[in-house]
Structures are given as C-alpha cells and as structure tokens.
Image (cartoon, rainbow, N blue to C red):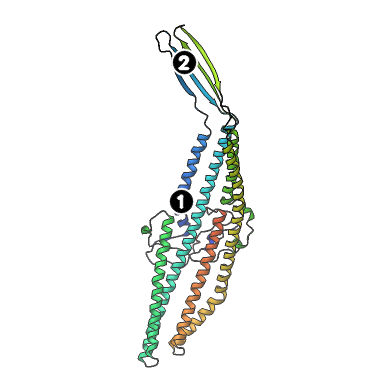
Amino acid sequence: MPALLLASLLWSALPPAGAQTFTLDTAIARALDRNPDIAAAGREQQATEGALLQAGLRPNPELAALEEDMRRGRRTSTLQLTQPLELGGKREARTAAAGLARDQAAWAVQQARADVRAAVIVQFVDLLAAQERLRLAADSIALAENATRAAGRRVEAGKVSPVEQTRAQVAEAAVRVEALQAEGAVRAARQRLAALWGDAPAAATRAAAAGRLALPPEALALAALDDRLADAPLLAQARIELDRRRALVRVETAATVPNLAVTVGAKRLQEAGVTQAVLGFSVPLPVFDRNQGNLAEALRREDKAQDQLAAAVLRLSTDVAQAQERLRSARAEAETLQRDALPGARLAFDAASQGFALGKFSFLEALDAQRTWFQVQAQAQRALADSLRAAAEIERLLGIASDTSGLSPVLLSVPR
C-alpha cells in the first residue's frame, strides 16, 4: 500500500528568512532516538535478558565440612559435596516463562516507539496548525490596519461617522489579541515537541515546522484492518501475557515435585587411620506444603490473563473504529469546506473589500466578510488537523513504529 498519512504533509510557503526549519521525518527520528520512555522500555527489555539467563541456570552445589569428637586421636573429619537435582521440569518451565517475559518486553518497546511516533505526528500537526493560525492572524492584522486607515480617511472626508473608525480600531485590537494567542500556541507546540525529544521546555527553539496540513488518504479510514489488528503490539503483549501465565502454571506444577539432593564425600577416622566414602541423598516430604496455594494463584492469574486478552481485543477494535469514524468525519468536513465554503468566502471577501474601498459597502459589511473568510480558513485548518490526529491515532493503535510500514508509512514531508 502506498505511503498514506505522512505523505499528506507537504511543503508550503518558505519560512521566514534565517529561521531554522525541521521536517516531520526529522522530528520523528530525533524522538525515536532520544525519547526517555523508549529508553526506559529498552532497559526493561535488557533486564529480561538477565532474567532469562538466570532462569536457565542450575542450582549450585554445596560443600560442607564436619569435625566430630575433637579429642586427640579420636577426631573424625568429614568432607562432602551435595548437588541439588531439580525434578519435574522446573528449569525448563522457568526458562520458558522468562523467555515469554522477554518477548513481551520486546513488544512493549515496539508499542513505546509507536506511541512516541504518533505523539510526534500530533504535536507536529499542532505546530503546523499554530503556525498557520499565526499566519492568518498576521494577514488579519494587515487587513485590519488597512481598514482602520480607510475608515479614518472616510471620516476625515465626512463620508461616514467617527463610529466607523472606532469600530475599525476595535476590530484591529481583536485580531492583535488573536495574534498573541497564536504566538502562545506556537511556543506551546514547540515545547511539547521538545519534551518528546527529551529536552526541557526551556530548550524549545524558535525553529519552524516545514510543511502544510493536507488531507490524509481515505484508505486509512476505509481499509479493513482486521489482519493488521491481530498483529498490533497491544494484542501481542496480551497474548504473550496469557502464554506467560500458562508457563507460570507449569512452573508451579513442577514445584509440586520434590527436588533430590545427592551427596558424595569422604570421612576420615583419625583413630583407625582410615578414610571412608560417604554417599547419600535427601528429599523433602510433601506432607504439609505441596505448593497448592501458589498453584491455585497461578491458575486464577491465567484465567485473568484470558479475560484481559478478550478485553484488549474488544477495546482495541473499538478504539480503532472510533478513530476511523473521527477521521471520516473530519475528512468530510475538510473536503466540504475546501470545495464549497472557502471559494465562496474568498469571493465575498474580495468583493466586500473592493466595495468598501469604493464606498459601496459599509464597514460592518466589509468587516463581516473579512471575519467570515478568516473563520472559514481557520475551520478548514482545524478539520485538517483533526483528520491527521485521527489518522495518527489509528497508526498508534496498530503499532506502526517506523516509516517503512506496509500499511501506512506516515510522516514524510514531500519537498516541492
């Protein structure tokens, strides 16, 4: 399947001169390399390697020395070596359980990478949306300043009431406030991206995101994802947890079989001047403790893991379906706005602006057309951002953690 979500983020207008820019793939690569959550998941995976190594080790032998009757000439010295022998397949069961824990940790790393990748997409989209909002606010300020000057000239010429100029000034102040809010949104988005990179909020730079918001492919909302859902890391972890619990049941079942300890050694009789061989064995008698409590606990935890797997399947399929619905809704809204609302709002704005300059329309009419034009643009940007966020959520749930996935290699800014 061709590239989907990431390929929908394309280059737009050049950033301000001298500004440092970064693309989405750059942001993702940096986060995957430096994010502390991914590092922590990797450490856990490394820890399970140690647990697997330990699970496969045999019990250590035990060396014992014994001195009897300390009187000269009658002393007896015994030296013996005891080797415990695990019976009932304990080591094999223990190793199998540890191996499954390692596999589970590996899937956790995969999910952590998918979570961080999706978070970067969302924050990158938020930054692009905030930058676009700031651009619209700057355009609004320029238009508001022109309207204020035009209203002032018409007031000086005695064509309109001074109230018109006051209204223009109020409108200009309002768009300046909007610009301040947009600047704050840009800074906040940069800080959130910096956190995903493992940097403190104070380290957020003034770099700009290079790209523009565009519709994600419809295929991501319509594709049958059952096969992909079965391979999602969240479900893989739940399935492995069930297998691990079953392996732990085998561990506790094996523990009901007593271990055997074999002893060999030598006994020196000083009085007789002879050395005797010592052979023996010991085995605990499972009279009271037959590990029945631990086995009952392991069985119930196996049942719990089975229920958790069923819940995970239901929850994941529901979350994906809801994300797809959000994607379809936001995509349809954005398409409608781009096809119907934006062209009409633009024509109305141009006509009202020219008519106001020629004295054919009142300031309120021109102001209303201007406000509608920018509101429709902002609404279209929000719909695009919502659709991209929903697409990123779908890919997070599916566990896509790299740009080479067959389903949706998302996040490649395509240069012009």
Name of the residue lying farthest toward the bottom: 158
Side of 320 relative to 193 (left or right): right
Q: Tell which tag, 2 or 1, sits nearer the viewer.
A: 2
Camera-side residue: 242 or 126?
242
Query: x and y percent of residue 406 in the render?
Result: 59, 54
Disc 2: which residue: 78
Q: Is residue 209 above or below residue 67?
A: below
The spot of residue 184 in percent (x, y) is 39, 67
> Residue at image x 40%, y 10%?
71
In the rendered image, the quadrant that contains the N terminus is bottom right
For this view, does 198 lie left or right of residue 105?
left
Amino acid type of disc 1? Asp
Task: Report which quarter residue 87 is drawn in.
Answer: top right
Residue at position x 52%, y 79% in the image: 345
Three-letter residue code for mark 2: Thr
Q: Which mark is residue 37?
A: 1
